[in-house]
Image (tube, grey):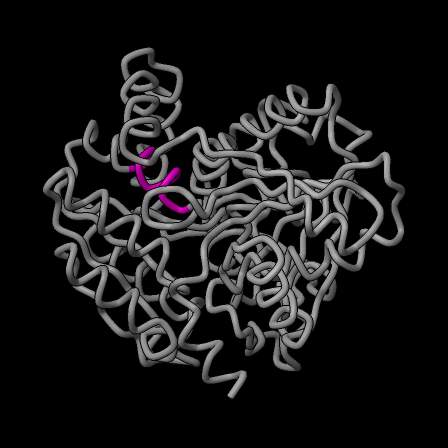
Amino acid sequence: MDQQLKQEGYFGEFGGSFVPPELQEVLSYLSEQFYKFRDDPEFKEELRYYLSEYVGRENPLTYAERLTKAWGGPKIYLKREDLNHTGAHKINNAIGQILLAKRMGAKRIIAETGAGQHGVATATACAMFKMECIIYMGAEDTRRQALNVFRMELLGATVVPVHKGQGRLKDAVDEALDDLVRNYKNTFYLLGSAVGPHPFPTMVKHFQAIISEESKRQIVEKEGRLPDAVVACTGGGSNAIGAFAHYIDEPSVRLIGVEPDQAPSLTQGVPSIIHGFKCLVLLDEEGQPKKTYSIAAGLDYPGIGPEHSHLKVSGRAEYATVTNEEVLEAFQELSRTEGIIPALESAHAVAYAKQLAPTMSEDQIIIVNLSGRGDKDVEQVYQMLK
């Protein structure tokens, strides 16, 4: 990809920054600071320290022997983001951005969250660095993820329920962006998904690429070669772009994103602008972002990251959908077979890997990115199964 286009925040035709002039000034400064510190040896050393000593990286690439046997076909490996501190991949990005915010002199941090894991990760980072923390969360999601709301508040964050629209992730992003426009002089927006105006998608990918950096090295150590496929769930797209990043230039590796069949942005979306950037978006008859629903709050978004949109249109990555029933079955199967309770988001990837396995041979390998653990979802699943 052309380096200049990448620097301007475009992935093919997708990305960019479509925001008011005063906000563009803030984003341009953020971009400048990100590129300045990203390769700074002191910044990199501090980031490595916290990822190791606080987050607990590197995390394992676990061979799922019983799952492999149960499904037949290829070897199944699980990249264990569920073992990170706070229970998901979100902390990778939260630590990276909070270190950047610290260098920029920020004292007030805002964030959006759907499933609550990014909110928890942001609140955790703010507690550590003694920063004010405001988390916007859809009112419907605060009900579905009440445990995570309590965790955020326990960590010192103020959780603001958003009642507009459907009270879900899109509405939380709306409110966070409105806050940033009003308070940009003293506020750092710690965005959790690979979405939004430039430089957010590029920043989030940079901090989440640690997932594939590790898995690529680990699979070569274990198997002596690259995997045949990497599978990850896609909502806003942060765990998937992190899981794909170091394989994008490896054409032998299939990259497969999995989304809910009721929020199929990549499989049914059209190019449009949402939240200040261009991507594939689900639109209604009036050309407005469509109402979506997923049992996994973190995937309940009518758009998708711009790089995923480009990977889809260019054909480099494949995207598929699974049903709620398939997700619940995968949630239970992984729990019973391997003793690992996955997040509902991650169970989407597990559900599709189960469909993919019979189409592949025993000498092939699938890496499933287990983006988070299911503690936060157990009560919700209990109610649904009842």
In-front residue for pair 256/301:
256
In-front residue for pair 209/224:
224
Q: Residue at x 53, y 43 (%)?
A: 16
- Expressed as whole percent of the image width and height from the top left, the position of residue 360 reads 88, 46
Q: Residue furthest bottom?
A: 386
Main secondary structure found in the magenta portion: helix
Instruction: Name the image quarter holding residue 116.
Output: bottom left
Q: Residue at x 76, y 50 (%)?
A: 69
Instruction: Name the image quarter holding residue 332.
Output: bottom right
- Expressed as whole percent of the image width and height from the top left, the position of residue 297 reads 46, 69
On screen, residue 307 versus residue 72, left or right, reads left
> Image quadrant for the N terminus?
top right
Q: Residue furthest top?
A: 41
110 above or below 6? Answer: below
Which range is magenta?
90-97
Instruction: Name the image quarter holding residue 52.
Output: top left
Q: Residue at x 55, y 26 (%)?
A: 213
On screen, residue 3 versus residue 106, left or right, reads right
Q: Residue at x 35, y 33 (%)?
A: 56
In-front residue for pair 224/241:
224
